[in-house]
Image (cartoon, rainbow, N blue to C red):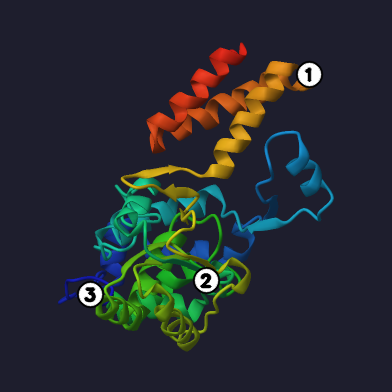
Amino acid sequence: MTMTDIALTTPLVGSLRDLEFRLGVKRADLNELLKSRSSMYQPFLRPKKQHPYPGKLRRLNASKPIKYRRIDNPSKQLKEIQRRILKKILSCIDLPPYMFGAVSGKTLVAHATAHVKNQTSTLVRMDISSYYPNVTCHHVYFVWQVVLGCPPPVARMLTELTTFEWHLPQGAPTSSAIANILLASIYAPVCLASEKAGLTITTWVDDLIFSGPAAREIMETVRATLAAAGFKVAPEKREIFGPRSEKLVTGQRIGRTSPRASHQKMSELRAAIHRLAIGTVDAADIEKYRQNLSARIAHLSTIHEGDAAKLKYLAVKSGVVLK
């Protein structure tokens, strides 16, 4: 299986005039924009998600250095052009069914549901190390010119509009779609080996999931396939869940018949309800704490209504009023 099950018999964008028409912007204006491209990004660092509740886990995390994610942050003007590229060009591409992340109409629940049938088997999770920063302008040009068949002048302009400092920018509307197309274009060896081994495979952008009795056997093929394209597997994020293990897919536990909340998440939410009930939350933080807790339980109800109902019942029993 390659990027899609269809063959592009004509270029996705046939000429610069075609590009002007699709984006509703004159090429002279695009060229003028590109002259100041380096100043049209305002990068900043965003702290990675931390434990949301006071207590043991948060105190433990507080002693660790805060990790940050760089957001390249394109300007409003450039972001609008990138949104048009996404809507008018990239959204025309039919991605393979195993891709879920940043794909219209697909959800976290659907992603986890794909692996429910292998709940009593083995599940392997692998992650591409620093995927966006390692998707270079050469990779992006390959997507536009080779995979999508755009003529070189068009591919060059689209590459310049969708990259920053020689890589795929975090925070650009086009980045996830380009990342998906690039991965799909190199993923054929993994797809073929997985099909031969009878595995279920899914991706959530750079998060790669494999389930089935022979899931461990695919790991070397994945490593070699990524290495051939200039990428690495993140060793600290590689996980193997055996037949009797709790299996997590994008934060959800694979239940017998459907995705569920993880045991850790249920434990954290029960503890949060208990802290509100016994009054250990600072008075100044109670309202924000309650809102956070209510939102997390509401989100949980979209994954598994039964798990959310248990927490709501516990809150009522404990005298905790949720929003």
Name which quarter of the figure residue 204 lies in.
bottom left
Name which quarter of the figure residue 103 lies in.
bottom left
| Residue at (81% x, 54% y) in the render | 64
In the displayed structure, would residue 267 be above or below residue 290? Answer: below
Question: Badge 2 is on which residue?
Answer: 128
Are the residues flagged by discs 2 and 1 in contact, CB closer than 8 Å?
no
Where does the C terminus fall, quadrant-wise? top right
- Label 2's element? loop
- Which residue is more in the foreground, 250 or 212? 212
Question: Badge 1 is on which residue?
Answer: 284
Callout 2 amino acid: Ile
**Mark closer to the chain start, 2 or 1:** 2
The crowding category of the residue bearing disc 1, from other C-alpha atoms within 10 Å (few below 14, some 14 to 19, many at least 20), is few
**Mark closer to the chain start, 1 or 3:** 3
| Residue at (33% x, 44% y) in the render | 258
Callout 3 amino acid: Pro
Are the residues flagged by discs 1 and 3 in contact, CB closer than 8 Å?
no
274 sits left or right of 214 in the view: right
Question: Badge 3 is on which residue?
Answer: 11
| Residue at (65% x, 28% y) in the render | 272
Residue at the extreme front of the image, as rendered = 244
Alpha-carbon distance for marks 1 and 3?
A: 59 Å
Where does the N terminus fall, quadrant-wise? bottom left
| Residue at (53% x, 28% y) in the render | 295
The crowding category of the residue bearing disc 2, from other C-alpha atoms within 10 Å (few below 14, some 14 to 19, many at least 20), is many
- Which residue is more in the foreground, 175 or 319? 319
Callout 1 amino acid: Ala
- Residue 212 percent location from the top left of the image: 34, 68
